[in-house]
Image (cartoon, rainbow, N blue to C red):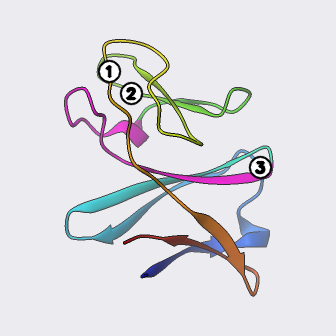
Amino acid sequence: MPEFEVARADEFPPGSTKLVYAGPTLTLGVYNCGGTLYAIEDRCSHDDGPLCEGDWDEDLCRVICPRHGSAFDLATGKPMSLPAFEPVKTYPVHVVDGVVKVDVG
């Protein structure tokens, strides 16, 4: 399973976000929500818009699509509001030797 480096863990504190280009057709948003790390595909399931360019709610661990306002749970990718009704893919995130990494594949 390919791994992609996001950042050094000590440089990615709670409240941090980063876009990671994991391949020619895959971009991920990586979030540190209160010390828990999440990665979600940067593609709204409603209209394929750039999901991770929107705001996010650190208290609820949700990202909000900038196009139509659908909120997605960072842990599950489940849409929490319309107009989206299909989930977005999420990916495992872990820290190895002090580096935040995302598993894709």
Q: Position of residue 103 (x, y in %)?
A: 49, 72
Amino acid type, label 1: Ala
Quarter residue 8 falls in: bottom right
Quarter residue 105 falls in: bottom left
In terms of sequence position, does the residue under pointer 3 or pointer 2 come before the other?
3
Left or right: 35 as drawn, with respect to 69? right
Residue 102 image label: none
State the CA–CA distance, disc 2 to disc 1: 9 Å
| Residue 36 belongs to the span the image colors magenta | yes
In terms of sequence position, does the residue under pointer 2 or pointer 1 come before the other?
2
Q: Nearer the viewer, mark 3 or mark 1?
A: 1
Q: Quadrant of the N terminus?
A: bottom left
Q: Residues within 10 Å of mark 1 (few under 14, many from 20)?
A: many
Q: Nearer the viewer, mark 2 or mark 1?
A: 1
Amino acid type, label 3: Pro
SS class, disc 2? loop
Tell me what residue is drawn at x 37 percent, y 12 percent: 82
Left or right: 26 as drawn, with respect to 52? left
Cβ–Cβ under 8 Å for marks 3 and 1? no
SS class, disc 1? loop
* Rendered view: 26 above or below 16: below
* Rendered view: 8 above or below 90: below
Amino acid type, label 2: Cys
Residue 14 image label: 3
Tell me what residue is drawn at x 38 percent, y 34 percent: 87
Cβ–Cβ under 8 Å for marks 2 and 1? yes
Write the start and end of the magenta stretch as one range: 35-53
Q: Position of residue 67 (x, y in %)?
A: 29, 22
Furthest residue in direction top, as rendered: 82
Residue 84 image label: 1
In this figure, which residue is indicated by the disc labeled 2?
Answer: 65
State the CA–CA distance, disc 3 to disc 2: 21 Å
